[in-house]
Amino acid sequence: MKRTIAFIVLLTVIGTGSPLSAQDADQEQDLQELYRQIDDAIDHSPEYVAKRLGQIADTQKALRAESSLEKRFALAEQLFELYKPYKNDSALYMADLCISLADSMNRKDMVGLYLSRKAHKCSSSGLYVEALDLLKRVDRRALGREELTIYYAAWMHLCGELGSYAQQSEVQLNYYAMQDAYRDSVLAVADEGSELYLHLKMDVLSGRRQYQDALAVSNRWQKQVTDGTHENAFASFYRSVVYEKLNNGHQRRYWLGKSALDDIKCAVFDQASLFMLAECLCEDGDYERADRYVHFCEACNTAFSPQLRNYQVRYVANVIEAVCEYHQTRYARLLKIACAGAVILLGLVAWLLLRQKRRRPQA
């Protein structure tokens, strides 16, 4: 009877184990296919960049030919959006142009909007003093709901950055408290279907460890974006963050890969997903691909802004260190094998010589 039960249990384990193994194999195959698509996108990156540059050139040409202030402002806004993920200093210049044109039209709401957008760009690239000065120039009373959302978001980001660099704990906690307050302000005024609202809502839910609720928000977000766009890349990145907290390595890698792939195809140079994916690949032992990804990403981010930000430097350093350690270990192993082979060969030669000497007839 006991043998029968044991046999049934064994069959059950085998029966349930096989599909899991097949599922794991399918997931790994999906990841490898995604990595191949990223490899191909990197190879074709100059084509995607050329497309963005073409859009920029066409819009600049239209701007130069336009005399209407309203239409010039609309074209300057388009240029700001085109430059925003591609080249930081050009985006800052276009923000200044938007501010100037809005001021000429006596649109204080648009002046405030682009002061806020420029401030966010400044704090994203380490220009904290400049960001603070810009935000202090905003007339909050002139802002509508949309402009107020961007204004609060810029303050939130700046306070978070200042908190992360503060050396004294009291100062740090104060900035983080301000960041939380501005986050609440953003959530209070933002459109609930907007990108900003959705990613902040996911942050809040993840912070409370309500991960399934965060994924539900992510599901809603995914339905609103189109595959192959920068918006989809952003939504995919935040989905990967939730899976990281859930310790789901496969899903984290998959959504980081989706985010990186869309950003490459959109010629986005302000990248984060590919850095993080490269570090994951080091953990998986795929050092060659990790090295390629991190160097490509480093080149993109350096073109976006001459100075890499601290988190970017950390990823570059971690991947390069892991790749160097791998090569050193590999070379050391090859050296040991070569030395062992040389010793064996010398031993064999010595044995053959000794054998030949013994067989030689005595005089």
Image (cartoon, grey):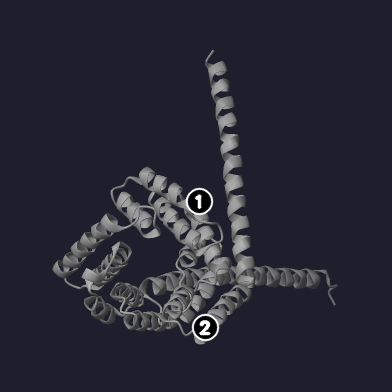
Mark 1 — residue? Answer: 250
x and y percent of residue 226 in the render? 53, 56
**Residue found at x 27% / y 68%:** 143
**Residue found at x 48% / y 81%:** 303
At label 1, the amino acid type is His
- Identity of the residue furthest to the bottom in this view: 64
Q: Is residue 155 visible?
A: yes
At label 2, the amino acid type is Gln
- Mark 1 lies on a secondary structure that is helix
Q: Earlier in the sequence, mark 1 or mark 2?
A: 2
| Number of other residues with Cα within 10 Å of mark 1, as a class: few under 14, some 14 to 19, many 20 or more | some
Which image quadrant is residue 194 in? bottom left
- Location of the C terminus by quadrant is bottom right
- Identity of the residue furthest to the left in this view: 170
| 97 left or right of 291 in image | left
Mark 2 — residue? Answer: 60
